[in-house]
Amino acid sequence: MSANRIHRYIIREIAVPTAMALFIFTFVILMGRMLKLVEMVLNKGIPILEIARLFTYLMPAFLVITVPLSFLLGVMLGFGRLSGDSEIIAIKTSGVSLYGMMKPVVVLAVVASLMTGALTLFAAPASNTAFRNQVFEIASKRASVGIRPRIFNADFDGLVLYTENIDDRSGVMDGIFISDERGGATPAVILARRGRIISDSESLTLTLRLENGSIHRSPKEKEKDTYQVVNFAGYDINLNMGEQLTSSQSRIKKDRELTMAELSERYRDATTDKVRSAITVERQNRFILPLAHLIFALIGVPLGIQSNRSGKGGGFALALAVFLAYYILYSLAKTLAVESGFPPVPTVWTPTVLFLLGGGYLLHHAATERRLKVLDRLSDFFLHLTRRSMRRK
């Protein structure tokens, strides 16, 4: 059997479970958001096309996570099946070593890395910007979307809003209670029978228009405390959506929405070390995540070969454990770099380098046909968990 034919066979064994896992993982993540978005369609009357657009904008951010996980699972399941059916031995007898079998795996890893790199460098920042703009547009047109009756809502700066009832279609609220702390030392309590939020899409301003109510204040004077009550037939409150607007009515972008050029410009304009560290971490993040596929290629092949005894269920659990371990360490490194003042570049690259060295070590052991007892124990543990869950079902 020629080496090229073996390489194509290995690619097919990895590509099929990878594609299936990618579909399943992405679908599961989307389901977590779908319930809330469907509620917006049914109860708030938001057009289905706007919701579909939001789903489209979310996809790049989801794929950055699901593609590496799916690739790791595909490699482990593919080589686990080859090992379980003794095809690894048959391939070696044909003159192809384990390092030779790594060639198609590395090719797939490079393809996945390039795709993830395109997502992190170009698609994800653009989609994050488009998603926030779309959400802001929906919030501006239908500001009452996030308000729930009989729940204290604190989405607006300095205001806590409570309403007994709200009409989902018109947005008219009844029985309104507002705690207004924008006055600093003189907070106010506002009661109104009815009110609704009016938006101006051109100036990006929101106004809460109240009817038939009263304003209660208790200003602290030097000599004595006083209590003021002001009744009104109509009263307007200007709403501020936190960081969404600035004095120039332009939205402040988050770091994950910026292009590489914009990140460099913000880094030059940064005034604190913490802001510079956060920007540096964001820039490094866009190069580190694509390299995860190469790490998972080195780790997935030896783990797939050695963990074949635990079956597909155990292989899935082990792949998930490796994936979570990497991302937990990576998230910890990012937190240390941003919040604790650790050097950003070496700190965020440490988990990647450690896993890269660990993957090379595991691959060398597998190539020399030496087994690691720790992996055998892990395989037995996941096999035990799989059988126990099956018995419960």
Image: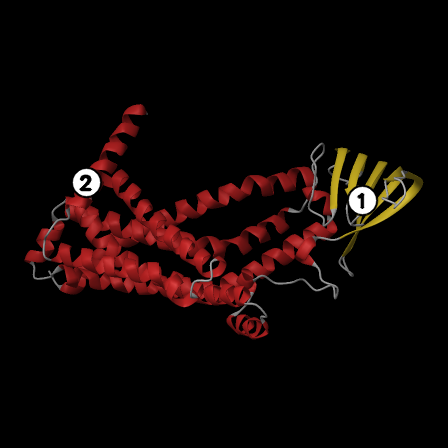
Q: Quadrant of the C terminus?
A: top left
**Image location (x, y in percent) of residue 33:** 54, 44
Relative placement, left or right, of 129 versus 329 is right
Relative placement, left or right, of 139 versus 378 is right
Q: Residues within 10 Å of mark 1 (few under 14, many from 20)?
A: some
- Tag 2: residue type? Arg
Q: Residue under circle 1?
A: 187
Q: Residue at x 72, y 34 (%)?
A: 149
Q: Quadrant of residue 113?
A: bottom left
Q: Residue under circle 2?
A: 377
Q: Quadrant of residue 375?
A: top left
Nearest the viewer among 7 and 131 is 131
Outermost residue on the front side: it is 223
Outermost residue on the top side: it is 392
Relative placement, left or right, of 345 versus 390 is right
Q: Residues within 10 Å of mark 2 (few under 14, many from 20)?
A: few
Nearest the viewer among 44 and 252 is 252
* Residue 205 at least partly seen: yes
Q: Quadrant of the N terminus?
A: bottom left
Q: Is residue 3 above or below residue 73?
A: below
Element at label 2? helix
Q: Residue at x 66, y 47 (%)?
A: 47
Q: Is residue 165 above or below residue 365?
A: above
* Residue 115 at least partly seen: no
**Image location (x, y in percent) of residue 61:** 48, 55
Nearer to us of marks 2 and 1 is 1
Relative placement, left or right, of 44 versus 104 is right
Q: Is residue 229 above or below residue 358?
A: above
